[in-house]
Image: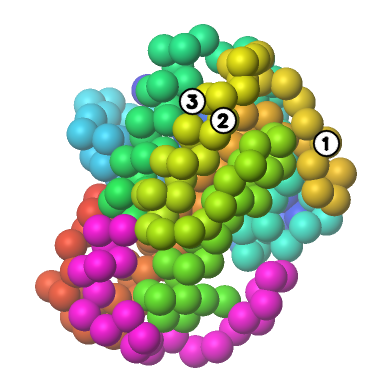
Amino acid sequence: MRIACVWEHNGEDSLLYAENLIGAFTRGESRVIALRKMEGEVRSYLRWRGESVQTSCEIVIVQEKSSGLAVCDADSDVLFETEKAPLDAAEYYGLKKLALRSARDFLALYEAIPDKGESCLAERETFYGKRPRTAEEMYTHTKNVNSYYFGEIGVAADCDGTIFASRSRGFESLEQHEDFLANRVYSGSYGEEWTLRKVLRRFLWHDRIHAKAMYRMAIQTFGRESVPNVYQFHE
């Protein structure tokens, strides 16, 4: 199976995105480490989608972005070349379905945590402040990008209610725009370029980052059998 990847890096610190499996990614202190992790990530991601890989993966880097951002903490501003093309309705609704499924699964994982205010993790500073340590903090942080991501492409959205409810309303607002499938390129905050395709990818990617952190925190804090592996993370 050929996996086309976009490599975003700050020096050697690397983020690697599977361009043709929207939302799958790895991080590493070097490109070699990120590449080494990718096949396990692909298998995990496809298990979450109810699919499987029957052969080994061929990992190919098709785009590179050198960044000054803290990619070690998953700061990112890359726009894939493939994220500039218009969407057809079938592709959009397929990606929307995945983004809503991810929101629903993220909520299910959060609700399964025995104590949402407890964590064994130490405090650590990131580019956006102290990293979320507890399930409550991780959930709130992940839910609260809803208005930001939609806002970057000119769509009014909020973060009220659950992560699933707010994301659903965001998509309803998006679909009121007659030409939303044109996938125009927007100049968003800090000069970052955004498209609808990128928003769809960022929702899946951001959910997966923090769901993985929440799951690992939970099994360290409460024990391996304390929460379900909703996202089928590779262990």
> At 71% from the left edge and 36% from the top edge, which residue is drawn?
154
Q: Residues within 10 Å of mark 3 (few under 14, many from 20)?
A: few
- Say what secondary structure mark 3 lies in: loop
| Badge 2 density bin: few <14, some 14–19, many ≥20, Cα 10 Å | many
| In this view, the mark in front (3 or 1) | 1
Give how far across and how far down residue 64 sits, in percent.
Answer: 73, 35
Q: Amino acid under label 2?
A: Leu
Q: Going from the N terminus, do you reach mark 3 or mark 1 first?
A: 3
- The Cα atoms of the two marked residues, 1 and 2, are separated by 17 Å
Q: Which residue is mark 1?
A: 187
The image quarter containing residue 210 is bottom left
Identity, as a three-letter code, of the amino acid under mark 3 = Asn
Which residue position is annotated with label 2? 174
Does the magenta-highlighted stretch encompass residue 142?
no
Q: Position of residue 70 (x, y in %)?
A: 73, 62
Q: Residues within 10 Å of mark 1 (few under 14, many from 20)?
A: few
